[in-house]
Amino acid sequence: MEKVLDFFRESKAELRKVTWPTKKQVWVSTGIVVVLTLAVGAYLFVVDLVLTTIFTAFLS
């Protein structure tokens, strides 16, 4: 049981050393992730559309 308590004490001490991001940094990072996800999704949609059109033309 002592090892478990030591683990939680050490974890708490380590979390105090963490430099947490500001609210603005979190919003900016989230925005970048959303924009990049939409961009990659749009790119894959266009590639899929082009390849589907090409293969449909060849196979029919």
Image (cartoon, rainbow, N blue to C red):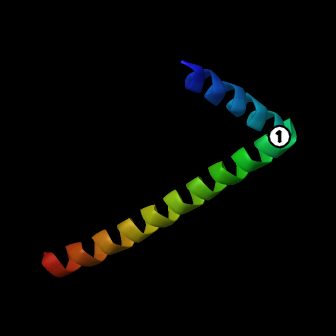
Residue at the extreme top of the image, as rendered:
1
Give the left or right position of residue 42, taking residue 56 as reference: right
Name the secondary structure under disc 1: helix
Q: Residue at x 45, y 64 (%)?
A: 44
Q: Please provide percent x and percent y for residue 20.
A: 81, 40
Task: Tell me which corner region of the image, top left, top right, bottom left or bottom right, holds residue 10.
Answer: top right
Q: Quadrant of the C terminus?
A: bottom left
Residue nearer the viewer, 37 or 4: 4
Q: Residue at x 68, y 32 (%)?
A: 11
Q: Please provide percent x and percent y for residue 32.
A: 71, 53
Q: Which residue does the numbered mark 1 point to in the structure image?
A: 17
What kind of residue is marked 1?
Lys
Give the left or right position of residue 29, taking residue 37 as reference: right
Residue nearer the viewer, 17 or 23: 17
Give the left or right position of residue 40, taking residue 11 as reference: left
- Near mark 1 (Cα within 10 A), the count class, few <14, some 14-19 or many ≥20, is few
Residue nearer the viewer, 18 or 42: 18
Residue at the extreme front of the image, as rendered:
2
